[in-house]
Image (cartoon, rainbow, N blue to C red):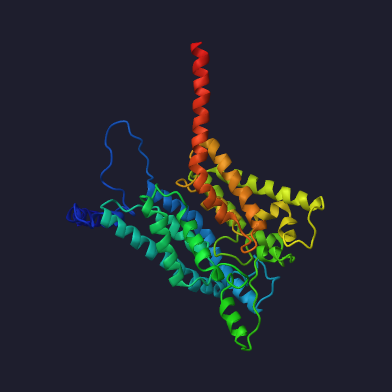
Amino acid sequence: MSLKSNLHSLKEKYRGTKMAPAFNALHTFLYAPNETTQSGSHIRVVDDLKRTMNTVILALVPCLIFGMFNAGYQHHLALGDIGRADGFFSAIFWSWDNLVIGLWKVLPLVIVSYGVGLAIEFLFAVIKGHEVEEGYLVTGMLVPLIVPIDTPLWMLAVAVAFGVVIGKEVFGGTGMNILNPALTIRAFLFFAYPTWMSGDKVWVHGAVARDKAIAAGQNVDAISGETVLGSLAQNHEPAYSVADMFFGMIPGSVGETSTMLILLGALFLIFTKIGSWRIIVSTVLGALTMGLIFNLVVSQGWITESSKFFGLMSTTWWHHLLIGGFAFGAVYMATDPVTGSQTNIGKWYYGFFIGFISILIRVFNPAYPEGVMLAILLMNVFAPTIDHYVVQGNVKKRMKRLKVKTA
């Protein structure tokens, strides 16, 4: 018997049982279901939710692979094994040793993220008797890319369980959640374990352990993993060039450092009509607007170099797009079709406010010099309100036209 025949037999065996949703999820991961419409006025396309999610994962893979190389590179750079002059195109950066370190640290994060998240998804599907929803396929890949490299696995497991259950399942599952699940997980980590999510020691592999050894009086070389945002927040001049920031040769979360690859991912998502170009463009416009306002404040002399906000305020307005997690959030988080605005006009307002508020929080948040996570979560809450007023505005316009015609 063929593999497809065997799978069909197993499907008949599990039909009507509690395990049917779990089996169907595995059965349709690579195969299209047999229950397809044969007649009638229905749209027939080859994609479904699972394949849409897989397309987003494809857009994330370059960031994942680069993040692995960069994890090893930043580790050796901080230890003094290599120099900062060895940049993106150097053989040292693309050394297999860097990739091995990245695999050793990042792969467990991916496994834990998918293992815990999908286990909970399957459990809820079996208990509630509905099909397994594929929304976590993307969330499971996003989570390892937005956390520090040395995040403890048990901590990640707790956060994933919280994000899936509280952030999604209690609202009814995929398509019903009001907050982006990946950012809900990230927010839980930030507020529950702040020392592991901020500072200058969490972004480079080995920095936390070596810092503790130094504090204990052991003879260990100093190690620094300060990010560009961390330097600017302390009014220090960052030791990274614009090229470093664009290509991604900087410390940061695993997948958010390379603006170049994120830009390519954005073009891919727009080309496949999965990511909204309106949200991406308006988010960038909002960030640039806020950056220009801050630059104007500095140029007018309304704030001096002695101010603790001077470093980030005086940052060249378009540099904000290259540092921190802004680009990653704008492309892969803000465009979430479930938690974002649904109307075309609403997407412009939704994205603009995300970008505007991101830079605002980035400058004025004394504890954590980044704002894209909080800005997106805030606008997730307001997205239905934005759409409501857009729809009501269209209704009023049509009512006015109707009155004119009947007059």
Q: Is residue 121 left or right of residue 312?
A: left
Q: Position of residue 312 (x, y in %)?
A: 71, 58
Q: Position of residue 121 (x, y in %)?
A: 34, 58
Q: Nearer the viewer, residue 297 or 15?
A: 297
Which residue is drawn at the image coordinates 42% and 63% (left, top)? 160
Q: Quadrant of residue 255?
A: bottom right
Which residue is drawn at the image coordinates 38% and 61% (left, top)? 117
Residue 163 seen from this side: yes
Quadrant where the N terminus sits is bottom left
Q: Position of residue 351 (x, y in %)?
A: 57, 45
Identity of the residue furthest to the left in this view: 13
All told, the count of numbered labels is 0
Q: Is residue 162 above or below residue 134?
A: below
Q: Quadrant of residue 79?
A: bottom right
Which residue is drawn at the image coordinates 17% and 56% (left, top)? 13
Residue 275 seen from this side: no
Q: Is residue 361 left or right of residue 49?
A: right
Identity of the residue furthest to the right in this view: 301
Which residue is drawn at the image coordinates 50% and 31% (left, top)? 392
Q: Nearer the viewer, residue 98 or 105?
A: 105
Q: Nearer the viewer, residue 393 or 1?
A: 393
Q: Position of residue 327 (x, y in %)?
A: 59, 54
Q: Is residue 62 left or right of residue 248?
A: left
